[in-house]
Image: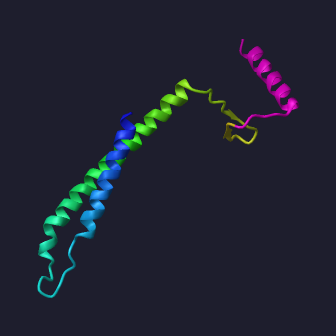
Amino acid sequence: MKINKLKKDIKKQREINLELFNSIPVPSHKDPRNEKAEAILKQWRDGSNKLKGMLRELQEMELANNKSINEHGKDQNIFINGFGEATKRNITCNSYKRTEKRTEKEILKFIS
Protein backbone atom coordinates (compact mmCIF):
# COMPACT_ATOMS: atom_id res chain seq x y z
CA MET A 1 0.00 0.00 0.00
CA LYS A 2 1.25 3.42 -0.88
CA ILE A 3 -0.40 4.93 2.21
CA ASN A 4 1.60 2.67 4.53
CA LYS A 5 4.85 3.54 2.75
CA LEU A 6 4.04 7.23 3.01
CA LYS A 7 3.33 6.86 6.75
CA LYS A 8 6.73 5.20 7.22
CA ASP A 9 8.42 8.00 5.27
CA ILE A 10 6.63 10.60 7.40
CA LYS A 11 7.79 8.89 10.58
CA LYS A 12 11.37 8.77 9.29
CA GLN A 13 11.27 12.46 8.29
CA ARG A 14 9.92 13.43 11.71
CA GLU A 15 12.83 11.65 13.37
CA ILE A 16 15.29 13.44 11.10
CA ASN A 17 13.68 16.81 11.83
CA LEU A 18 13.76 16.14 15.55
CA GLU A 19 17.47 15.28 15.42
CA LEU A 20 18.20 18.42 13.41
CA PHE A 21 16.17 20.58 15.79
CA ASN A 22 17.98 19.19 18.82
CA SER A 23 21.37 19.77 17.18
CA ILE A 24 20.79 23.52 16.57
CA PRO A 25 23.36 25.37 18.69
CA VAL A 26 22.27 28.11 21.08
CA PRO A 27 23.49 31.67 20.36
CA SER A 28 26.33 32.82 22.58
CA HIS A 29 28.23 36.05 23.30
CA LYS A 30 30.84 35.08 20.71
CA ASP A 31 28.20 34.39 18.05
CA PRO A 32 25.07 36.44 18.94
CA ARG A 33 23.52 36.08 15.47
CA ASN A 34 24.01 32.31 15.64
CA GLU A 35 25.63 32.07 12.22
CA LYS A 36 26.91 28.56 12.96
CA ALA A 37 23.34 27.32 13.03
CA GLU A 38 22.36 28.66 9.58
CA ALA A 39 23.24 25.44 7.72
CA ILE A 40 21.38 23.26 10.23
CA LEU A 41 18.38 25.62 10.25
CA LYS A 42 18.22 25.49 6.46
CA GLN A 43 18.21 21.67 6.53
CA TRP A 44 15.57 21.68 9.26
CA ARG A 45 13.33 24.12 7.32
CA ASP A 46 13.68 22.08 4.13
CA GLY A 47 12.80 18.93 6.05
CA SER A 48 9.80 20.64 7.62
CA ASN A 49 8.52 21.74 4.22
CA LYS A 50 9.01 18.21 2.89
CA LEU A 51 7.15 16.82 5.92
CA LYS A 52 4.24 19.23 5.43
CA GLY A 53 3.96 18.18 1.78
CA MET A 54 3.99 14.50 2.71
CA LEU A 55 1.30 15.05 5.37
CA ARG A 56 -0.85 16.95 2.87
CA GLU A 57 -0.45 14.13 0.33
CA LEU A 58 -1.35 11.52 2.95
CA GLN A 59 -4.46 13.47 3.92
CA GLU A 60 -5.57 13.71 0.28
CA MET A 61 -4.96 9.99 -0.28
CA GLU A 62 -6.94 9.03 2.82
CA LEU A 63 -9.78 11.34 1.83
CA ALA A 64 -9.90 9.83 -1.66
CA ASN A 65 -9.80 6.35 -0.16
CA ASN A 66 -12.69 7.16 2.19
CA LYS A 67 -14.75 8.59 -0.65
CA SER A 68 -14.24 5.48 -2.77
CA ILE A 69 -15.27 3.28 0.17
CA ASN A 70 -18.44 5.32 0.69
CA GLU A 71 -19.30 5.16 -3.01
CA HIS A 72 -18.80 1.41 -3.29
CA GLY A 73 -19.37 0.35 0.30
CA LYS A 74 -22.44 0.50 2.46
CA ASP A 75 -25.45 2.60 1.51
CA GLN A 76 -25.58 6.06 3.04
CA ASN A 77 -29.08 6.30 4.45
CA ILE A 78 -29.46 10.07 4.87
CA PHE A 79 -32.83 11.72 5.20
CA ILE A 80 -34.25 15.02 6.41
CA ASN A 81 -36.15 14.87 9.70
CA GLY A 82 -39.08 17.05 10.75
CA PHE A 83 -36.79 19.85 11.91
CA GLY A 84 -35.05 20.09 8.52
CA GLU A 85 -31.85 18.44 9.77
CA ALA A 86 -30.00 15.81 7.74
CA THR A 87 -29.40 12.69 9.78
CA LYS A 88 -28.23 9.11 9.26
CA ARG A 89 -30.14 7.73 12.23
CA ASN A 90 -32.93 5.33 11.35
CA ILE A 91 -36.45 6.07 12.54
CA THR A 92 -37.86 3.07 14.38
CA CYS A 93 -41.34 4.41 15.10
CA ASN A 94 -43.90 2.61 12.90
CA SER A 95 -46.35 5.51 12.84
CA TYR A 96 -43.61 7.78 11.42
CA LYS A 97 -42.86 5.24 8.68
CA ARG A 98 -46.56 4.89 7.78
CA THR A 99 -47.00 8.66 7.64
CA GLU A 100 -43.89 9.02 5.50
CA LYS A 101 -45.15 6.38 3.00
CA ARG A 102 -48.58 8.03 2.87
CA THR A 103 -47.02 11.45 2.20
CA GLU A 104 -44.82 10.02 -0.56
CA LYS A 105 -47.84 8.43 -2.25
CA GLU A 106 -49.78 11.70 -2.09
CA ILE A 107 -46.86 13.60 -3.62
CA LEU A 108 -46.48 11.04 -6.43
CA LYS A 109 -50.24 11.19 -7.17
CA PHE A 110 -50.11 14.98 -7.30
CA ILE A 111 -47.08 14.98 -9.62
CA SER A 112 -48.44 12.38 -12.08
Name the outermost residue toward the right: 95
> Looking at the picture, how far across and down is residue 48, in whole percent?
27, 57
Write down the region rendered in magenta.
89-112
* Quadrant of the frame with the C terminus: top right
Q: Is residue 60 above or below residue 43?
A: above
> Looking at the picture, how far across and down is residue 15, in whole percent?
31, 58
Name the outermost residue toward the bottom: 29
Which residue is found at the position 16% from the left and 71% from the top? 37
Q: Is residue 43 left or right of residue 22?
A: left
Q: Quadrant of residue 83?
A: top right
Q: Is residue 29 left or right of residue 20?
A: left
- In this orientation, does residue 61 appear? yes
Which residue is found at the position 23% from the left and 69% from the top? 23
Q: Is residue 37 above or below residue 27?
A: above
Q: Is residue 11 left or right of residue 85?
A: left
- In this orientation, does residue 56 appear? no
Q: Is residue 21 above or below residue 69?
A: below
In this view, the residue in front, 23 or 58, is 23
> Looking at the picture, how far across and down is residue 25, in whole percent?
20, 75
Q: Is residue 29 above or below residue 52?
A: below
Is residue 93 on the magenta stretch? yes
Q: Quadrant of residue 90?
A: top right
* Quadrant of the frame with the N terminus: top left
Is residue 6 on the magenta stretch? no
